[in-house]
Image (cartoon, grey):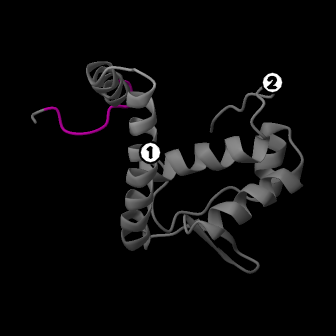
Amino acid sequence: MFELDMRSRKPIYEQLVDKMKELIMNEVIKPDEQLPSVRTLATELTINPNTIQKAYRELETQGFIYSIKGKGSFVNPNNQIKDLEKIETVKKELEKLVIEALYLGIPASQLIKLIEELDASKGGGDSDD
């Protein structure tokens, strides 16, 4: 499914949360699709099941997945409202970072170039703007 960087300073469960969110947002994992069980994913990634459980709990808290007792975890199809809230939060955080970058002397053109490069590497957005 994906790989985790065991040498990273970022905790494994956070890496797992980020990877799962990316798969959900890019619709690699579809709404209402069942996620691998904690045990299965722990075996596949050779990490502690408690780490998987912690990541799933975090994803559920953030509204990306929901759980059904005895059945497992599934991708939450009701992300539109939460997505709008998340977009606003990200915009505010991005605004703070851009202001800080400009204050530190990074030219706006360099920031724009960085965003365009990131957009191209992630395959995001429409190219006919």
Q: Estimate how packed mark 2 is, as few (under 14), some (14 to 19) or many (20 or more) residues with alpha carbons within 10 Å.
A: few
Q: Earlier in the sequence, mark 2 or mark 1?
A: 2
Q: Is residue 128 above or below residue 58?
A: above
Residue type beneath disc 2? Arg
Residue found at the very far bottom of the displayed protein: 69
Which is nearer the eye, 20 or 81?
A: 81
Q: Quadrant of residue 4?
A: top right
Question: Is 17 contained in the magenta span?
Answer: no
Residue 62 in the image: state x and y as whole percent: 59, 65
Per the image, the residue denoted by label 1 is: 96
Per the image, the residue denoted by label 2 is: 7
Tell whether 104 sits left or right of 20. Answer: left
Tell whether 123 sits left or right of 8. Answer: left
Which is nearer the eye, 110 or 100?
A: 100
Tell me the chief SS of the magenta region. loop
Q: Is residue 128 above or below residue 42?
A: above
What's drawn in magenta, residue-wise? 121-127
Residue 71 in the image: state x and y as whole percent: 70, 75
Q: How many marks?
A: 2
**Quick one: SS at disc 2?**
loop
Query: How far apart in space, not on screen, are marks 2 and 1 (Cα)?
Result: 30 Å
Residue 51 in the image: state x and y as whole percent: 83, 51
Residue type beneath disc 1? Lys
